[in-house]
Amino acid sequence: MKRSTPTLDRRKAVAEILRQRGDALVLTGLGSTCWDAAAAGDHPLTFYLWGAMGGAAMMGLGLALAQPARRVLVITGDGEMLMGLGALATIGVQQPANLAVIVIDNEHYGETGMQRTHTREGVDLAGMARAAGFRAAGTVYSSTQLKTWVPRFYRAKGPVFATVKVTTAYAPMVLPLRDGTAIKHRFREALLGPKAFE
């Protein structure tokens, strides 16, 4: 099977995705997507998922169901998504119209030593999402393709899924807030206001 070669820089791709976020709720997977989102600009409506590998899409689903009037973006990596593939089926059944799942796919496990993931061997995450019932699903290889997908992340009726293929080029670590309780409280107050704690 002939495959396209990724050319996108992960840091620039995430910045491009988040440039139009407005008041969207963003949940990142662990590792590089945390750093990429922080590098694009820390935001109180970004929930950095430092751990819980495999749980990002399910947490995004819960948030989308709890806040149906708000757009929810999950930005995670290929290794994390591969660990939580069952989430695609559950999201497909639930059909949240306000949810977009974006996989930043460098085809490697960046957290454990850059071992190749299954996407490097041809596993098609967008195909799996499509088969699970996502309304739109595709694979992005170029900046031109990314520009056409960004509006879908925010406005298309979901669930929406995209695999964004990026290179393995190194990007400096930009560490956001690491305290899970503080992240939760900050996000909750930004979303619900000070009365959230009464």
Image: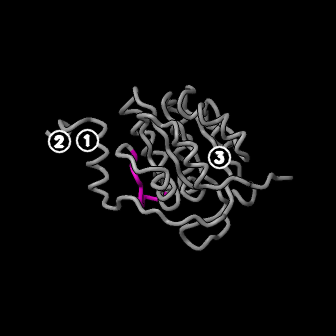
First to last magenta residue range: 46-53
The residue where tag 2 is placed is 197
Percent x, y for residue 9?
A: 65, 55
Q: Is residue 154 left or right of residue 119?
A: left
Q: Which residue is mark 1?
A: 189
**How much space separates mark 1 and mark 3, taking CA atoms?**
31 Å
Residue 105, given in percent of the width and then of the height, sits at 64, 54
Res 152 → quadrant: top right
Q: Amino acid at mark 3?
A: Thr
CA distance separating discs 2 and 3:
37 Å
Asked if the stretch drawn in magenta spans residue 51, the answer is yes
Neighbour tally class for label 1: few under 14, some 14-19, many 20 plus, Cα within 10 Å: some
Type of secondary structure dominating the magenta stretch: loop
Q: Which residue is mark 3?
A: 163
Amino acid type, mark 1: Glu
Q: Are marks 2 and 1 in contact (CB under 8 Å)?
A: yes
Kind of residue sitting beneath label 2: Phe
